[in-house]
């Protein structure tokens, strides 16, 4: 076999072996467990949950965590979740978890000030911000265990007036950053393979 052909085969084999590690994006993991209207539930986190960076009109950047759960067993509801905007771009993972308290205010939850949370926006596929019934939680909290450029991990807890409690965990990647990278790096892209058979 000519040397150039051998090198092509070697490059293709190397790329194939490296693809799972250098191209794959970790899947979001997490679930909501607890009681909804007196019934025990387990609602999985969906694959379109992510962490991203958003900018205000003044140019300031904030970290946003979008969490979508599948509320199995809830009639006519496809998804349910929350959009969390953090103040600035916090980065921590080795420090103790950070907790923010959420308080009801009319038809929504707002973070207790001062807080790591800039904005808390609940949503459902039906268009309402919260499940109805039971309505807006009477109390909530967010605990962040890790926020890095490529992951956000933690949980939030809702307490409802009917005694129901939902604890929702999440570990989500920053998919926008992953999509912006050169997908060929490490797998023969960017000049990693030279087909010139000069020697």
Image (cartoon, rainbow, N blue to C red):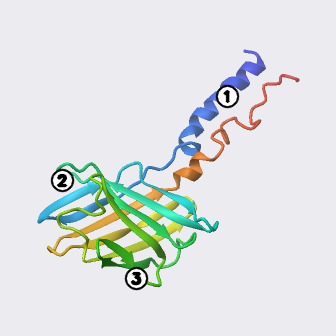
49 versus 184 height, above or below: below
The tag earlier along the polypeptide, 1 or 3, is 1
Q: Position of residue 84 (x, y in %)?
A: 43, 66
Q: What residue appears at the point 48 percent right and 73 percent down from the top-left corner?
A: 118
Question: Which numbered circle lies on residue 196?
Answer: none
Quarter of the picture containing the N terminus is top right
The residue indicated by pointer 3 is 112
The residue indicated by pointer 2 is 74
Q: Nearer the viewer, residue 63 or 169?
A: 63
Residue furthest to the top in view is 1
Q: Nearer the viewer, residue 55 or 92?
A: 55
Is 60 left, or right, of 135 in this rendering?
Answer: right
In which quadrant of the rendered view does residue 128 lie?
bottom left
In which quadrant of the rendered view does residue 2 lie?
top right
Q: Position of residue 182 (x, y in %)?
A: 66, 43
Q: Position of residue 172 (x, y in %)?
A: 45, 57
- Alpha carbon distance from label 1 to label 3: 58 Å
158 versus 181 height, above or below: below
């Amino acid at each position: 076999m000519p040397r150039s052909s051998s090198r092509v085969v070697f490059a293709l084999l190397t790329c194939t072996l490296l693809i799972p590690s250098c191209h794959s994006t970790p899947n979001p993991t997490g679930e909501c467990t607890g009681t909804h209207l007196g019934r025990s539930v387990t609602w999985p986190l969906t694959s379109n949950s992510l962490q991203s960076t958003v900018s205000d009109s003044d140019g300031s950047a904030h970290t946003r965590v979008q969490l979508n759960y599948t509320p199995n067993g809830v009639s006519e509801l496809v998804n349910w979740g929350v959009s969390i905007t953090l103040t600035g771009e916090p980065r921590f993972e080795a420090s103790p978890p950070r907790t923010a308290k959420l308080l009801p205010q009319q038809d929504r939850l707002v973070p207790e000030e001062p807080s790591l949370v800039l904005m808390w926006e609940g949503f459902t596929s039906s268009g309402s911000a919260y499940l109805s019934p039971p309505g807006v939680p009477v109390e909530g909290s967010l605990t962040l265990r890790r926020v890095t450029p490529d992951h956000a991990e933690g949980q939030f807890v809702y307490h409802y007036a009917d005694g129901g409690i939902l604890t929702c965990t999440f570990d989500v990647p920053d998919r926008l950053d992953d999509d912006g990278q050169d997908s060929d790096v490490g797998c023969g892209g960017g000049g990693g393979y030279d087909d010139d058979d000069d020697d």
